[in-house]
Amino acid sequence: MDFELPLDILELKTTLRRFIEREVEPRANEIEETDAIPACIVQQSRELGLFGLSIPEEYGGLGLGMVGRAGALEELGRTHNGFTTFIGGHVGIGTYGIVQFGSLEQKRRYLPKMASGEWIGAFALTEPDAGSDPASLRTKAIKRGNAYVLNGTKRFITNGDVAHVFTVMARTNPDTPSKSKGISAFLVEMGTPGFKVGAIEKKMGLRGSHTVELLFEDCEVPKDNLLGNEGEGFINSLKVLTNGRAALAARNLGSCEKLLEISLEYAKERVQFSAPILKQQAIRHYLAEMAMEVELLRSMVYRVAWMVDTNQKVIKEAAMVKLFASEAYNRVADRALQIFGGSGYIKGSPTERFYRDARITKVYEGTSEIQKNIIASELEKGLG
């Protein structure tokens, strides 16, 4: 068994680590204050090819497999999670559906612009009454001649205010006995008549990454913008989310690594009772627990990434790694804040920022409870 990453991925990780430490992290507090990603960082991300991580080379992307993407996203997770989510939402669920299920014409039309970062992608599944139960979505797409007319509302859509093309799930057959089999996917461009961006949510964390409402009112989409076959949108969306969960776990790994590093450094420098707090057994135990979480998560992340690259079924494993990654991230963030004490609770402290940002990982792209249900369902199938 070879646990070494390929040389090209190691070189990419080194480049991204340098970019993160020199350009992004020094602007983390600026992102917090302005709730925006600085234009210079976006441009540098384009130049590094970050928007094309998951897009094939023939369309201008880096064409990385899941192991390579995990390596890149691990590095991105070490800095401001709003920036990480902005990039991750695009290269993950924002583009994966087009890469996997798009027609040749759709790929040629969208992927080059998305690979360069000229266009941003977003994924629109969640609705006000369809969150953990996405098969109950109400947005409708009625076929009229050579087009589909969309009506409905989407909620909590990452990058929704800056995206140029959206993968939108809508119900094309309301009469089918199976709710999920009546759902199809559509590519909808920003500026399409009848489509507009609604409210931008004010969130506890992930500043710089905007989450919005999308409104469709008699929005006419050409039939050529149907992504995949009619009625297969829901099952394809589950495949997109499975891939996205593996990617999110890699980002969480990077955040955990960073929290462990800064906590260890602080424990060496902070003196109480005439000695560094690193000498206190409680602090040593916290650090040991954090290190264990990091190593376990690293093993899971790259095993699942390898399984994806070798075309193995990963529904259960992707749910497991997403569940463990989000829960571990929250535990590590909690331990880090405890080590930093009051200093870690103050605005401007990385621990305070990571602590707030960690919480949403137990909710988005499938709650922890939903991941447990998926795992149990897959176990049940295996026993049947």
Image (cartoon, rainbow, N blue to C red):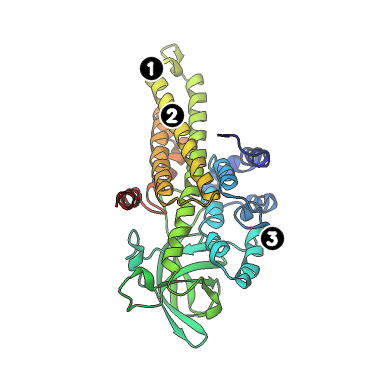
Query: Tag 2 or tag 3, which sits nearer the N-term?
Result: 3
Image quarter (top left, top right, bottom left or bottom right) of the N terminus = top right
Q: Nearer the viewer, mark 1 or mark 3?
A: 3
Q: In this view, does 340 lie above or below 316?
A: above
Q: What residue type is labelled 2?
A: Met
Q: What residue did someone put label 3 on?
A: 58
Disc marking residue 281: 1
Q: Residue at coordinates 40% horizontally, 31% vertically from top-left?
A: 335
Q: What residue did someone put label 2 on?
A: 292
- Residue 170 position within the rendered picture, expressed as x and y whole percent measured from the top left: 42, 72
Q: Residue at coordinates 46% horizontally, 28% vertically from top-left?
A: 291
Q: Looking at the rendering, which quadrant does residue 128 occupy?
A: bottom left
Q: Please give left or right for residue 7 compared with residue 246 in the image.
A: right
Q: Name the one closer to the observer, 198 or 254.
A: 254
- Residue 224 position within the rendered picture, expressed as x and y whole percent measured from the top left: 56, 78
Q: Which amino acid does label 1 sit on?
A: Gln
Q: Is residue 263 above or below residue 250?
A: above
Q: Residue at coordinates 53% horizontally, 44% vertically from top-left?
A: 306
Query: Tag 3 or tag 1, which sits nearer the N-term?
Result: 3
Q: Which amino acid does label 3 sit on?
A: Glu
Residue 36 visible within the image: no
